[in-house]
Image (cartoon, rainbow, N blue to C red):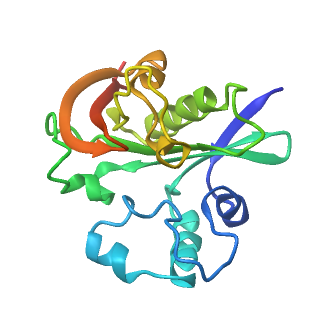
Amino acid sequence: MSIVVHPATSYDDVATMVGPKRPDANVCWCLSYRLATSKENRELVGTDRGKRVRKLVRQDPPPGVLAYAGDEVVGWAAVHPRSDTSFATNRKIPHVDDLDVWSLWCVRVRPGHRGQGIVNALIEGAVEFAREHGAPAIEAYPVDNRGAKVDLTMAYVGTLAMFERAGFVKAADTDSVLNRFPRVLVRRDLRN
């Protein structure tokens, strides 16, 4: 199966990947880190979250990338300049230096399509998307699970091993914990 990754400019496909089954449900929509402040995240509820995503997919750059198997959307990765995310001010995730890096904070594959290499394609697609938009480096904040099973609802951040396989290197420990696992900051330099 051939997987292609494109910028997330289709609202319907983003909704398939991260939207709720009921439009009025108050779910993440992958906005929790994309919104600059936790106050904004708390106040944006129900259908307003989907409306915000509709605006984001029309912006340049859009809020991430989508993976396709043929015409079917099978994966999503949220990637954007860190300065446009809550990682810009997050006290638990350090800044390694002053580079204007991009953040990759969510990788999702649709049920029924897992175990087919889609995660690898998504990470590479996110890296290329950031590179094409002039990012000097890209960071992610996966859990260091040391091979232990990660609950699927919390697996969206990825694992250290997954990102190391994609050429990222551990750049720092963080004070963040998810699903009882410490999160680490990994980075891939894009200046070469």
Task: Locate the N terminus and report the quarter of the image it occupies.
Answer: top right
Q: Residue 38, percent across and down?
A: 28, 70
Q: Is residue 129 left or right of residue 41?
A: right
Task: Locate the C terminus and report the quarter of the image it occupies.
Answer: top left
Q: Is residue 107 left or right of residue 35?
A: right
Seen from the viewer's position, the closer of residues 78 and 190 is 78
Toward which corner of the image does residue 93 lie, by quadrant? Answer: top left
Q: Which residue is drawn at the image coordinates 70% and 46% (left, top)?
A: 110
Q: Residue 26, percent across and down?
A: 52, 76
Q: Is residue 143 left or right of residue 73?
A: left
**Does residue 123 lie above or below 89 as drawn?**
above
Q: Residue 71, percent across and down?
A: 85, 46
**Does residue 138 lie above or below 7 as drawn?**
above
Q: Which residue is drawn at the image coordinates 41% and 18% (left, top)?
A: 164
**Does residue 46 lie above or below 189 as drawn?**
below
Seen from the viewer's position, the closer of residues 141 and 124 is 141
Q: Which residue is drawn at the image coordinates 58% and 67% (left, top)?
A: 58
Toward which corner of the image does residue 99 lie, by quadrant? Answer: top left
Q: Which residue is drawn at the image coordinates 59% and 35% (left, top)?
A: 122
**Does residue 59 lie above or below 123 as drawn?**
below
Q: Residue 96, percent across and down?
A: 16, 34
